[in-house]
Image (spheres, helix red, strand yellow):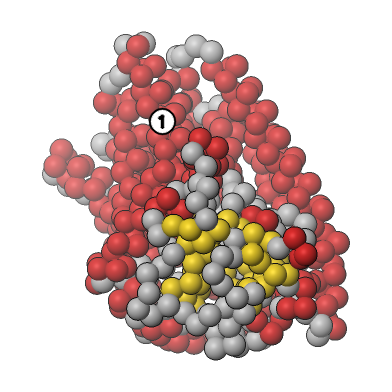
Amino acid sequence: MKNTVIVSLLIMAVMAFFCAMTPWVFDDFGYGSGGSSLTAIFAVQMNEHQSWSGKFVGHFMARVLLHGPTWLHPVLTPVIFMGLVFSGVLLVLGVQWREKLRAWHLVTLAGLVWFALPAFGTVYFWRTGTPDYGYSLTFATAFLVPYRFWMDKEDYRLPGGTALALAGVLAGCSNENVGMLAILTASCIAIYRFRSAKKVPLWAVAGIAGAIVGWVVMMTAPGNAVRLASLGGAEKIPVLSLNSFNRFLTFWSSQELEMLPYILIAIGALWLLRRQGRLRLATVLPGLVFFFMAQTSLAAFLFSPSTPYRAMSATFFYIALCCFAFIAAWAAQGGGEKLLYAAFCAVLLTSVVVEAGVFITAQPAIEARNQAMAAGTVTARALEYPTTDKYFFPGYDIIEVDSYGPQKLQMVPWDEAVSLDMPGTGTIRGLVICNVVYLDNLPAGKVSVAAVAHRQTVASKVQAVLRWLSPLTARETTFTPAITSRYAPASATVTADGKAALHIEGVTDLSSLAYMAVSEPGKPMAWKRVAVEASGM
């Protein structure tokens, strides 16, 4: 037990460092404005419930973090994260967790989550996003722990049905797909137990009822319709639009690719269990349940008008938990686990140290940004950082340039743009600032760009391998799959004055650009090789 406490404190200390080093970013300034009293925050949240979003719990907590003392985020968020890790371990170990719990369980699951979440920084370091996505995931996962114990012990009793009902409200009202997942999982366990015991205890009913109430309150908020309209209306929902459904299939396949390493590790552990003669249903059932929870969470985006990476936190947490469940089952009596654990810890420590360097290196740029904001002299260049990635997310996952307002392109230092060499076009000029490609002198229509993107994703590695094995040398092509399989694409509508901004995570400079295409009415889209003109380099 002593080792688990020490490990927990170390994990929380690491999380506290990153939380403290993360600046306020974009929505933080909006959610952090206004009155700071709980009454004022509650009133603003009630107004948002009517005019923008039903995610009351997450957004209320975001305002608390932003209006509270500066130490609140670095103290509270690591505790919440540790709560998620501990709850995940309990879901794997079950009701006999006290006899089974080891320090390596906590380190391994925390490390898997660190690597797996596609927007870890946005989910756990961003003050606006952390309660919405990180806290909600903890609430829902902790809510399921008593139901997991009930699976192991048919006569499991939990005093305080009212408390679990309130916990259910938190789990259901926190986030759309996370709340839905909590309700479905708890309900399936209740149905299973009812078939064997012919009764369901009051605490289990109270918890599910609370979760349903919370989820319904969130989903029926009047503000949801306003937000949907701002995103493009019902035609953006895959189940209601063929075009959106086709986009969902692309999105779904890309996320399955990102989950593949964890699935392969789980399969490897299954194979080892089979070789050891320990492949029994009771051993593998938790991992299989978590796998289906991850897939269900991903399928829920059929009903969502958008698919931001931060919203995939539940999907990738449960696929990481699936992987961990099979590892824990094998390592209980396996061989060679100490060497593998040491290697995993070495990789994890290296990653954490590298990211700590990224955050430290960014501090002068953050200070310069803050000074420019205070002086009212902010430009796109003032919002540039030495390095960005899925952990240090400003400009990477969250664009700090006002993405929705009319001032977006006026903040760009167009005098720094250089000419691009692109066959059959006029003089297109461009520049790259913090993962955004800015283009000028474009013909009317829709511009698409394909670039080399440096991302911590499986897709990025696959694209790099394809570029190495089968480089694309054609100066012009109309075969879009040949482009998108090797490069990261992005598209934008050209403004009336011939400008466009395209956000591509992991693009560092203009040399990353490979192909460009402008779709004009009545003409087929042709991808053309693009490069920086020698005079502009």
Left or right of residue 125: residue 137: left
Left or right of residue 431: residue 152: left
Left or right of residue 280: residue 452: right
Taking 485 as reference, is 379 above or below it? below
Rendered residue at 75%/40% (across/down): 353
Q: Position of residue 181 (x, y in %)?
A: 34, 55
> In the rendered image, which quarter is residue 166 located in?
bottom left
Q: Nearer the viewer, residue 233 or 414?
A: 414
Taking 59 as reference, is 74 above or below it? above
Amino acid type at mark 1 = Leu
Q: Is residue 334 visible in the rendered structure shown here?
A: yes
Toward the front, the furthest residue is 424
Instruction: Return the residue at label 1.
Output: 264
Q: Position of residue 513 (x, y in %)?
A: 61, 58
Binning the other alpha carbons within 10 Å of mark 1 as few (below 14), some (14 to 19) or many (20 upward) gives few
Rendered residue at 55%/37% (across/down): 468
Q: Nearer the viewer, residue 476 or 438?
A: 476
Q: Nearer the viewer, residue 255 or 12?
A: 255
> In the rendered image, which quarter is residue 388 located in?
bottom right
Taking 192 as reference, is 416 above or below it? below
Screen quadrant of the N terminus: top right
Rendered residue at 60%/28% (across/down): 344
Q: Is residue 450 visible in the rendered structure shown here?
A: no
Q: Secondary structure at mark 1?
A: helix
